[in-house]
Amino acid sequence: MEYDKGADTMARALALISGGLDSILAAKLIKDIGIDVIGICFKSAFFGYESAVKMTEQIDIPLKIIDFTEQHLEMVKHPKHGYGKNMNPCIDCHAMMMNYAGKLLKELDADFIITGEVLNQRPMSQNKNSLDIVKRESGYEEYILRPLSAKVLQPTKMELEGLVDREKLLGISGRTRKAQMELAEKWGIKEYPSPAGGCKLTDIGFSARLRDLLLHDENPKLEDVEMLNIGRHFRLNDGVKVISTRDESEGKAIINLLSNGDYVFYALDFKGSTIVLKGEPNEDDIKVAGEICGRYSKGKDEKKIKIKYKKHENDKYNIIEVVPAKDEDIKQYII
């Protein structure tokens, strides 16, 4: 995609687009004061770009998608500034994104970076100190502008040098979303997700599964991280985990993520969940996985049912007979 500046364009900004409302409002505001805007969206194991595509289409700006999955995962393991309420390292994440955007300034012939951050909207990651840390850690402090809160923050280089008219920027602050909703209506932005709805690291259930994974595997494969999105997760012991899919689509998806050495279990005579066991199981672990398989099958009320299982890379199944587990039996294993 070409990103040539228009002949009458004074400047160009790279807008970090999360896919939420605030970032697209910031981009729209800057675009409407006569500055060319290119959206920059990031893809990782914890958030995608689909919403960003829809949002940028509504305000007619181009979007460049950057996949920083591996680098982002490494940061999530040990964030310098810690986590938020769950496994969300927002300060480190924002700084990382701005660093990537900063490195694109020259390549895309851009003058500065804008974000949709709003002062004090989030008590931990968007207070004054946190916003300052993000700018400093990004390595591009002088090039970052927050249009929605500019009038309640110190003037930036872009404003002081006349590249951006400070009087045309906003002074939104606090947790209320009234001003943003009014702007969305004014500018005809009709479809947008809920705040923070796109990042899995803010989800309590996903965070619990990720925390468990990193506790037992310091360097998980990307497939193991992606598997956290699928099914119910059970920790049998330090070396063995079991996953039970919820429907047919999850069953197909999880098979594509398996590695050699992983085990799969199915009820032999009944429809039901695909069960995956990861680790080096002993006989008791195999039995418990089989009982979980029985619980999430149409044969859950039978006295005994047959379960077939094998290593993913093998062709031949083994057969065991188990009593389907009751919910109270497996409650202790749920992650």
Image: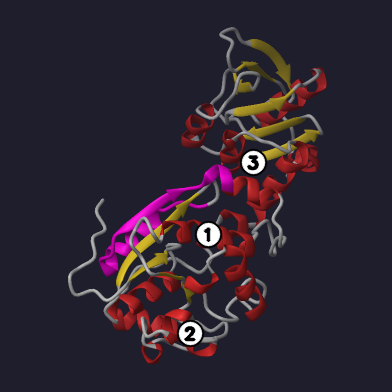
Mark 1 lies on residue = 99
Image quarter for residue 315?
top right
Report the front residue among 252 and 106: 106
Image: magenta residue range: 47-71
Which residue is located at x 57 percent, y 18 percent?
269
Mark 3 lies on residue = 232
Q: For residue 150, which numbered disc appears in the image? A: 2
Of discs 2 and 1, which sits in the foreground?
A: 1
The percent position of residue 297, horizontal first and vertical second, equals: 60, 30
Q: Is residue 327 left or right of residue 184?
A: right
Q: Amino acid at mark 2?
A: Ala
* Distance CA(mark 3)–CA(mark 2): 44 Å
Q: Is residue 250 left or right of residue 54?
A: right
Image quarter for residue 321?
top right
Q: Quick check: 89 above or below 32?
A: above
Q: Is residue 275 left or right of residue 169?
A: right
Q: Is residue 158 magenta?
A: no
Q: Amino acid at mark 1?
A: Asn
Mark 2 burial class by Cα count in 10 Å: few <14, some 14-19, many 20+: many
Q: Residue furthest bottom?
A: 167
* Distance CA(mark 1)–CA(mark 3): 36 Å
Which residue is located at x 48 percent, y 84 percent?
150
Q: Is residue 85 visible?
A: yes
